[in-house]
Amino acid sequence: MKNSMKTPDQKKRSKQLGKEIRDSRKRYEDLRAHGGSDPFWSDGVNMNLCRNHVMYFRKQVETELDPENYPEEYFLEIPAEVSVHYMADPDGIRSRSTAALEVLKENQDFQYLRSKLSGDLDKETSQCMNPVRYVLGMEDAIRRDDLVVMRRCQDPEYYVKYLRESRKKLDEILGSPILEPKLREGQLTIWDFIGGQ
């Protein structure tokens, strides 16, 4: 006699649960090999979450299906629990974020805004300093070797634009003339576009 808790359409449910287990395992392996992009949690935390999903769906299999209808994914080994500090490619994260920090700190807009940063700014002026605080926070993350924060800081392009827009806004607030960066004639370098040198 079948347990009343079992799912009526077991073949269909077996396929669904098999897919859920497979997808969770794939996400786990992708995080292990390539890392993720979660701005707040490490790859290890997210891998353990995927592991928990696998265990949850295995429990659903046991609850909802008769043993002869268990999907093949049920019999695969449960992914290993990993350290919550695990990050894929830590050396690459360090290298890319350090290079990005150098670009941002040499940026003329950053240097200008940094010179105006003080504790007695009004709300509107203070908002113009957000990209400066970001760069200083990034520097602190590198000093502390906080790979999760550093991972957010690997591509300076967005923040170069953010610094430029913030400087323009601050110049408008202060009534200063807006100085556009001057481009040299002839062969251009990356520094011509990001406000360095």
Image (cartoon, rainbow, N blue to C red):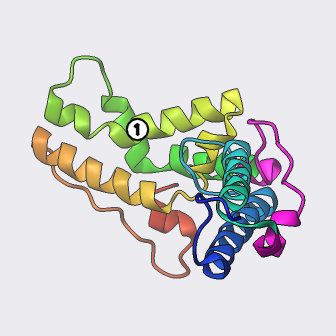
Q: Quadrant of residue 184?
A: bottom left
Which residue is at 62% across, 63% downward? 6
Which residue is at 15% across, 45% downward? 176
Residue 69 on the magenta segment: yes
- Residue in front for this viewpoint, 162 or 172: 162
- Residue in front for this viewpoint, 126 or 33: 33
Q: Is residue 173 shown left or right of residue 36?
A: left
Which residue is at 20% across, 43% downward? 170
Which residue is at 36% across, 50% downward? 163
Q: Quadrant of the N terminus?
A: bottom right
Position in image of residue 166 (x %, y %): 27, 48
Position in image of residue 168 (x %, y %): 22, 52
**Span shown in magenta:** 68-93
Name the residue furthest top: 119
Count of labels shown? Answer: 1
> Under tag 1, what secondary structure?
helix
- Residue in front for this viewpoint, 126 or 26: 26
Position in image of residue 174 (x %, y %): 13, 38
Q: Residue beneath label 1, please? A: 132
Q: Is residue 131 shown left or right of residue 2?
A: left
Residue density around tag 1, few if under 14, some if 14–19, many if 20 or more, within 10 Å:
many
Which SS type dominates the magenta stretch?
Answer: loop
Q: Is residue 177 above or below residue 157?
A: above
